[in-house]
Image: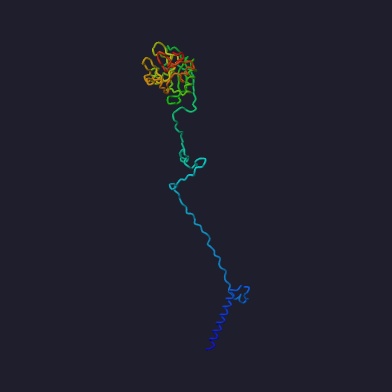
Amino acid sequence: MAARPVAVLTAALVCAAGGIALAVARDAPDEELPAAARLAAPTAAPAPVPTSPPPTFAAPTPSIVTPSSVTPTFAPSSPRGPSPLAPSPRGPSPLATPVRTSPAPSAPGPSAGTTFRSSITPVTAARLGSSYRAGCPVGVDDLRLVGVTYRDLDGRVQEGELVVHADVASAVVRVFRALYEADFPLAQVTTVESFGSDDNRVMAANVTSAYNCRRTTSGTGFSEHAYGRAIDLNPIQNPYVREGTVEPPAGGAYLDRSDVRPGMVVAGDAVVRAFAAVGWEWGGNFRRLKDYQHFSANGR
């Protein structure tokens, strides 16, 4: 019974001595430890190096943009002007403007670059129609059809025709060239047979005309028109006035010659000067009556 406690005590001492040795081995450097202690000391496993999982990326989610959800954005203006995508101050962007597939309608008016044109050709009795008949003072062979460019009362360029004597045809062309270049308007320029060669109808239609084998207004002889050496311009704006008679009647609105309106001929204007340049005289200078529409080569 007494020997057993002694054995237990001895074992406890041995364990205590081992613990001290382990403590010394843990606290002393390897080179200072006895070999037995170095062999007995447990070696610590190296600490694991922390690693992180490889990065993962989420796949982009496709999105569908509908046209109605798009909000247009515009680039700011550059120092040289608005961006091609920005609204132009002169109108919508070319991208928003429909393409025109047909020519734009043109406004009426004289064509830019249109030049005066003229022609002088022989005329036939058939072409003269009712304006010529047997007994007229000038034969058909002595007459010429003159084509001229003119501007009408709306400013549009037109082509007109007159019949005049052959010996004044070139002078008439020069006159109408001057009127065209001066932008003087004529209601219409045509030959009289379209109106039955009736002077009253011709005047009422405001026709600028020349040859017409007819008597003078007083009826005492042939008019200068029967010789192809007289021209009447815009009869309504330039009426025949004698002792209260106004022909055509619509010309009564133009008796005040100081109120100058388009198509009127007044003293010293471009029309009077153009005819004077070729030696013709104006009926507005007659003393006993005023024939504002009338110009003639001999002043009658």
| Residue 48 image position (x, y, % from top left) | 55, 67
Rendering quarter of residue 199: top left
| Residue 58 image position (x, y, % from top left) | 49, 57
| Residue 242 image position (x, y, % from top left) | 38, 15
Whether residue 149 is situated above or below residue 54 in the rendered picture: above
Instruction: State left or right for residue 32 relative to residue 243.
Output: right
Whether residue 45 is situated above or below residue 183 in the rendered picture: below
Q: Residue furthest front?
A: 258
Rendering quarter of residue 14: bottom right
Whether residue 12 is situated above or below residue 54 in the rendered picture: below
Q: How is the image coloured?
A: rainbow
Residue situated in front as seen by the camera: 296 or 281: 281
Residue situated in front as seen by the camera: 183 or 257: 257
| Residue 257 image position (x, y, % from top left) | 41, 20
User: In what quadrant of the picture does the C terminus appear?
Assistant: top left
- Total numbered labels placed on residues in the image: 0
Q: Which residue lies furthest to the bottom in this view?
A: 1
